[in-house]
Amino acid sequence: MFKINENYMKLPGSYLFSTIAKKVNAYAGANPDKEIIRLGIGDVTLPLAPSVVSALHSAVDEMADASTFKGYAPDLGYEFLRNTIVENDYAPRNCGIKADEIFISDGAKSDSGNIVDIFGDGNIIAVTDPVYPVYVDTNAMSGRTGVYNQETEMWSDVVYMPCIKENNFTPEFPEKTPDIIYLCLPNNPTGTTLPKSELQKWVDYANENGSVIIFDAAYEAYITSEDVPHSIFECEGAKTCAMEIRSFSKNAGFTGTRLGFTVIPHELKCGDIELHSLWARRHGTKFNGAPYIIQKAGEAVYSEAGKKETLDQVKYYMNNAKIIREGLIKAGYEVFGGVDAPYIWMKTPDKMTSWEFFDYLLNEKNIVGTPGSGFGPSGEGYFRLTAFGSLENTERAIKRITE
Ligand code: MLT
């Protein structure tokens, strides 16, 4: 008889956003006359920028012509895109990243989940609490998290770094030294971030302890503060202890188009072994590359027009963030984030639990958000709203919440 991966049986419930979608669909089905405003999952609402759409059209035409048709993409991604990424994202910040250290993929979620493949059993992972659930769930699927405790909502073998109001939602060095440290900055879900001097401390810590940092920079386009680094490779010594995951979803609206990349410097090694060569092996074996037309669309994000158009989109969402932040503060709510990130992290009112507030907003105000406790036990009593809605819906949602 075949056997299943028993680790899946240890996972609690379903994926956070699937649970929310089920609840919302049930409510919508029972109340077809209600108009629901969705500020839950961080999914964009603006259409793709004109430069991106034009690049997609041209690429489709190339695929329709035998002389320009493309089959399998190169394992690590097309050079035109990898070179463009280096020129635009890394060279201007003196990160010293080379094109052959960039692996193009179908998105940051896939990369942050798949990366567990190249790490051995017995690694201790450290995550912030609250945290983007993919990091923990994918480690649980590969049997690296121990036993799940329903009461504490924690795994026995995971090191949790609480990010709470008392420490400005920033992680502190844990008592137990981890092997793999996940950092998402600007942070999902709290919307907070770290200045370069603080991130440098994490790089030094990882180098001193032989840990690796998996740095999720999916929200870097939303940074407005001067002292906040856009890449971990702006920190000295990061190339020997960190890899970085980036996305085209949030800066250019590719949530449905799918494109991302991971940077693994050659200097990042375990003994003599480069993690780069392991990820290249994994990529070559299990992945056939992001489609040519999508990589061309990604290249267009970095064209002069593309940069302007996508920056305008980011500004549009950050205006929503401001509306949410200021509207809630004015109404007396305690609010965090929303300055360097498209997420607003609010304290639930009247000591409601995160799910109580979720139910209240859905049933009474017809608004969907994300319960903080879904991101980890330290998220209890908090609630996340996304700035990725339309301006009109954002304004209406804040009016509904605060009236
Ligand atoms: C979120 O809402 O946390 C994100 O949209 C999830 C994701 O990017 O996968």
Image: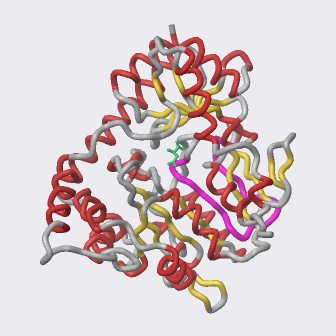
Between 378 and 150, which is closer to the camera in this rendering? Answer: 150
Quarter occupied by residue 22: top right
> Residue placed at 12% from the left, 77% from the top?
67
What is the image's colouring?
secondary structure
Q: How many marks?
A: 0
The reply, left or right, for residue 309 in relation to residue 239 is: left
Asked whether residue 139 is drawn in magenta, I would say no
In the picture, the quarter occupied by the N terminus is bottom right
Asked whether residue 172 is drawn in magenta, I would say yes
Residue 236 image offset from top left, x and y in percent: 51, 72
Q: Main secondary structure of the magenta part?
A: loop
> Residue placed at 71% from the left, 15% from the top?
350
Highlighted magenta segment, given as a residue range:
167-187
The reply, left or right, for residue 341 in relation to residue 313 is: right
The reply, left or right, for residue 12 in relation to residue 45 is: right
Residue 251 image offset from top left, x and y in percent: 36, 49
Quarter occupied by residue 289: bottom left
The extreme bottom residue here reads 272
> Residue placed at 69% from the left, 28% from the top?
354
The extreme top residue here reads 403
Residue 7 image offset from top left, x and y in percent: 77, 60
In the image, is residue 380 above or below residue 113?
above
In the image, is residue 223 above or below residue 349?
below
Between 92 and 399, which is closer to the camera in this rendering? Answer: 399
> Residue placed at 77% from the left, 69% from the top?
2
In the image, is residue 257 above or below residue 191?
below
Between 183 and 246, which is closer to the camera in this rendering? Answer: 246
The reply, left or right, for residue 26 in relation to residue 314 is: right
Residue 266 image offset from top left, x and y in percent: 49, 84
